[in-house]
Amino acid sequence: MLVSTVILYFYVRGLLQEEVEEELYSTEARIESVLKEKGPPYTLPPIVEIESVAAPGPEILKDTVLFDPSQDEMEDFRELTTYKNIQGKIYRITVRNLIVESEDILIAIVISYLIIIFLVFISLFYFNRAINKKIWDPFFKNLEQMKRFSLASEKEIQLLDSDILEFTELNKEIITLTEKVRSDYKNLKQFTEDVSHEMQTPLAIIQAKIENVINENTLNENQYEQFTSIQKDIKRLTQLNKRLTLLTKIDNRQFGNVEKVRITNLVKDSVQNFSEPFPVSIEYASHNEIIVSMDPYLAEILCSNLISNAIKHTKTREAIKIRAEGRTLTITNQGEEAIKHPDQLYSRFYRESSKTNSTGLGLAIVKKICDLYGYKISYDYKEGWHIFEIKFI
């Protein structure tokens, strides 16, 4: 647009100059015709001037600046001076024509182009906006459907058709992908449930047979210890199976029952339950109620796993301290040293010591539950105390 503006400026200026010069020659021809008919020479300064001269001169075509009485100011003129021999007399004929100033032309062109650019920009902006909205509307609606897509739901994803070839191809691939993922999810879910169910039955049978052997037979000390060890391994395997199944269900988001849960009441109940079988002192202080929206079963698992972890890893007779304040639940227990690898604390099967009777899944389940609902869990070690904090944001 800038280059074309400059070109147009010189082109228009040339056209105007040609028109002015053509008019000058036309006026000069009329004056010559009048003089040939013996009309009296006349002048109309500064437009027309006719003088008798002794000798002819060259024709001159130029720009000049003269005072214009009608405008009472200096103006730009295009001037043509010619010499004509008419009936033995030599006349100098000077004709002038007012020309438009170049600056006025440039300003007019620039303003016109700016107006055109502005109108074109506004038109294209709203036109493209309307067209783009129409074109992209199915894409964004389908994107919203993808965000709402859930593997646990039996409802198929509903995508809008589009006239755009690329969007149509994308819809086909999305439908194919979601169906494949849904099928794999169902197969995996079924496999997990079948394995969990099938493992529970033989483990229960083995447990029962071992108890019968212990109760109905006289065993020596070595045999009794072996059977007791087998019982512990079976219980650990049963617990491991249940926790792995729970982790899988959390990963698959199978806990959709969201209710208002009083965390402080659950912690209080868990403290009472753990105080009976374990000879550990638990101090619980609640400054206010913590009420959250989550699955009640997962809330119970969250509280019991945190307290169970504190009981298993306390090394002294110091009481375990639990405090609920604001939206934060804090559990502290005495420990001889800090955890060596806190970055692996929530990893599955991670245990600081093999001596601890733990599956290594308790804190992993706690972290999964917190991630599921957006809660923040943190660990710190200060002055011989392990500190776990959960902020219910």
Image (cartoon, helix red, strand yellow):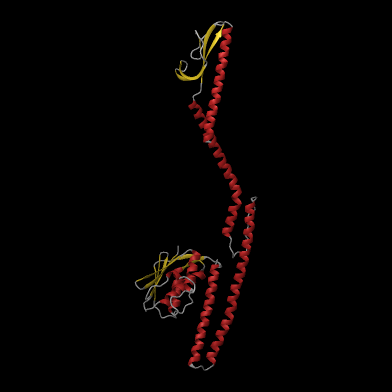
| Residue placed most toward the observer, 359 or 31 | 31
- Inspect this view and state whether residue 209 appears: yes
- Residue 31 coordinates in the image, percent (x, y): 56, 11
- Tally the numbered discs: 0
Residue with the most extreme left position: 383
Q: Is residue 225 above or below residue 372?
A: below
Q: Is residue 6 above or below residue 154?
A: above
- Residue 193 coordinates in the image, percent (x, y): 59, 73
Q: Residue at x 51, y 84 (%)?
A: 231
Q: Is residue 226 above or below residue 53?
A: below
Location of the C terminus by quadrant is bottom left
* Image side of residue 43 versus residue 388, left or right: right
Residue 352 occupies quadrant: bottom left
Q: Residue at x 61, y 71 (%)?
A: 190
Residue 175 occupies quadrant: bottom right
Residue 276 occupies quadrant: bottom left
| Residue placed most toward the observer, 120 or 330 | 120
- Residue 88 coordinates in the image, percent (x, y): 55, 5
- Inspect this view and state whether residue 40 appears: no
* Image side of residue 388 versus residue 191, left or right: left
| Residue placed most toward the observer, 97 or 188 | 97
- Residue 226 coordinates in the image, percent (x, y): 50, 88
Q: Residue at x 62, y 70 (%)?
A: 187
